[in-house]
Image (cartoon, grey):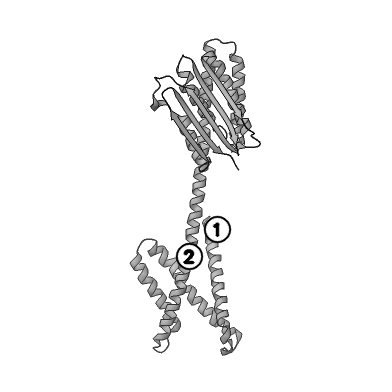
Amino acid sequence: MLKKSLQNTILLNIGAFLLVLILELLSGWMIVDRYDTPFSFFLWGLKYAFNIMAAIWINHFILIPYFFDKKRYVIYGLLLIASIFLVAYLEAYTKNNWSGVTKTFLFHFYTTGTGMAAFFLRRNMIIQRENTEKEKLQKEMELTYLKEQVNPHFLFNSLNSIYSLSREQSPETPDLVMQLSELMRYQLESSKNDTVLLKEELEFIENYLLLEEKRLSKRCAIEFLIDGDFLDLRIAPMLLIPFIENAVKHGAQSTNNQSSIDISTSIKNSTLQFCVVNSKPSQVSISHREGLGLENVRRRLKLLYPNSHELKIDDREKEYRVNLSIDLTE
């Protein structure tokens, strides 16, 4: 990386030198007759181009990194003026002719300032690109971490469901184990992708609800409504299931009384409207409502759909309501 950066710097400065040389030759083309040969005219242009670039190179490779970047601004300013004056003096001083030195100094002051503007503009662009790449990498790492957290969290909740039935020696336990294996297969396959078909994600949720419905028996009424044409809309995998798990865990699972979970999903103009409402026992504390699953999904929503989602959670005395809206337009 360092070798490539050095190579780019050398090529850039060679290009800048050639550009200055061409501009000098073009600007002096009207006085080419004053020179004995075209070669002597070329040497004149080469000299001026080198003097201009010398002042710029001293500034870029010595003064800026060793003084300006270290916040020694006064020393930097003094040395910058001194270096430009030295170049102007060596170029224009003849027989106590200070007027030529003054004009040359002002000219080099202008060209060095122009070079500084180009230098800081390029450096700022490089810094912005590096920061963007770092933010992108950080986002990808965080999303990977959050996605990996969903797997054990979901598996833990599902195994708890199977365990409850196995203790009751339910004859449905083998079937539920097979159903769980299908759910886990989908989860593992979907986790390899950034997005999945919304239709497949909703089918996964429906199968999970069937599993929970069997475990909870008749003490929980579960309703799952789907409305709209999903076409080929896609969504981040395992993004909606934490809301379902939360409704089961803090609603039906936390009480032996009759409870309910109502889930509705609709699509309008490529916008997903997802609503989960569950009854809750009065003794459930608000402070314990949100666990790892909801913290995870909140963060994923901010990273994946920063300006295209709206999440509203209403924790009432007798019910817990989640309203999520996501614009799934690609």
Where residue 299 appears, x then y in whole percent?
48, 37
Query: In the image, is 144 to the left or to the right of 289?
Result: right
Tag 2: amino acid: Phe
Q: Secondary structure at mark 2?
A: helix
**Residue drawn at point x = 45 percent, y = 81 percent:** 91
Image quarter of the C terminus: top right
- As drawn, the label of residue 119 is 2
| Viewer can see residue 285 | yes
Q: Residue 297 placed where, x, y %?
A: 49, 34
Q: Residue furthest left?
A: 74
Please state the horizontal and vertical placement of residue 144, each as a whole percent of the image.
53, 38
What's the mark number on residue 264?
none
Q: Secondary structure at mark 1?
A: helix
**Residue in the picture at 47% in, 59% down:** 124
Question: Relative to 251, is 31 above or below?
Answer: below
Q: Is residue 201 above or below residue 13?
A: above
Q: Would you say residue 290 is visible in this rendering?
A: no
